[in-house]
Image (cartoon, rainbow, N blue to C red):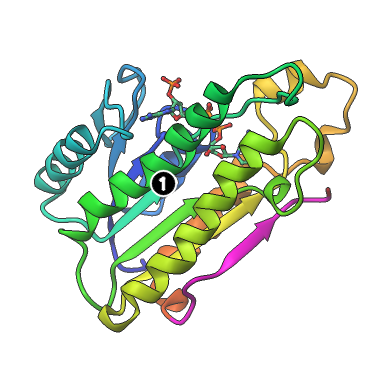
Amino acid sequence: MAQQRRIAVTGAFGTLGAAVVRAALAAGHAVAAIDRAPVPAGLGAAHGFGGVDLADTTAAKGALDAAAAALGGLDALVNIAGTFRFETLADGSAETWDLLYRVNLRTAIAASRAALAHLPDERGRIVNIGAAAALKAGAGMGAYAASKSGVMRFTEALAEEVKTRGITVNALLPSIIDTAPNRADMPKADFSRWVRPEQLAAVILFLLSDDASAITGALIPVTGRV
Ligand SMILES: NC(=O)c1ccc[n+]([C@@H]2O[C@H](COP(=O)([O-])OP(=O)(O)OC[C@H]3O[C@@H](n4cnc5c(N)ncnc54)[C@H](OP(=O)(O)O)[C@@H]3O)[C@@H](O)[C@H]2O)c1
């Protein structure tokens, strides 16, 4: 088996987060699952931390410290917590821009800062989730794309900051993910073209592995057949 990692996953009770937790456990890793939502049933062997607003730096530090204590240390952080809003300027509000910044970017900043106190030199890993839709914003996508662009620039900057420690920081840029809410919102779409959570989880686990030690600061589109 590949080397076992101690992995903290944020947004772990959502669709992608749960898929990453399942894949990591199946691969024999030890997992701390952190989310603002309550701890659900069926987490398996993962340590669950619910009710954590990761945009709150004190709460983020408390959760990452508790995760490291539960796992006996921490090798990797996967920042998945996030959300989406579609809103034009005419019909929207400035608060939406604040909200998406807070949920999509500030959570990753606060969790990464807390995790870096634990991550080991030479093999520490951070993986963030950007968005392919943030590479060029369409109408109504401004606030979301700006927040995810922030995640992408944060990924690049932090990768440079910790490069000499041998810690890698990368981001996946998914297109629309095959989730139940997306299927409900777009019932006539061809779901077979959408990237599946399991496919994203496989790429994330690769980035956490020894084989990916030379990849850092990368923004990797994982877009299925879109
Ligand atoms: N779905 C897509 O098509 C798509 C496409 C590209 C990128 N992405 C990105 O991929 C990631 C996962 O998407 P998903 O569809 O799996 O989302 P999801 O099912 O909504 O899961 C996101 C999870 O993050 C949690 N969360 C939100 N704000 C938080 C906070 N402040 N502190 C802690 N946890 C928080 C949510 O908890 P609550 O339920 O309490 O809010 C939820 O459990 C997100 O970053 C998303 O932006 C998604």
User: Pointer 1: what residue?
Assistant: 79
Q: Does the beta carbon at disc 1 come under 8 Å from ligand 1? A: yes
Residue 195 among those drawn in magenta:
no
Which residues fall within the magenta stretch?
Answer: 214-225
Q: Is residue 177 left or right of residue 19?
A: right
* Residue 205 seen anywhere in this rendered image of the structure: no
As shown in the figure, which amino acid type bears the numbered disc 1? Answer: Asn
Instruction: Name the quarter where the N terminus is drawn.
Output: bottom left
Q: Is residue 198 left or right of residue 121?
A: right
Q: How many marks?
A: 1
Measured along the vertical axis of the image, is residue 50 above or below residue 107? Answer: above
Q: Residue at x 55, y 69 (%)?
A: 218
Main secondary structure along the magenta-highlighted residues: loop
Measured along the vertical axis of the image, is residue 29 above or below residue 207? Answer: above
Q: Is residue 66 left or right of residue 183?
A: left
Q: Secondary structure at mark 1?
A: strand
Where residue 6 appears, x then y in whole percent?
Answer: 25, 55
Q: Image quarter for residue 66?
A: top left
Q: Residue at x 73, y 52 (%)?
A: 223
Where residue 221 appears, x then y in whole percent?
Answer: 68, 59
* Residue 100 seen anywhere in this rendered image of the structure: yes
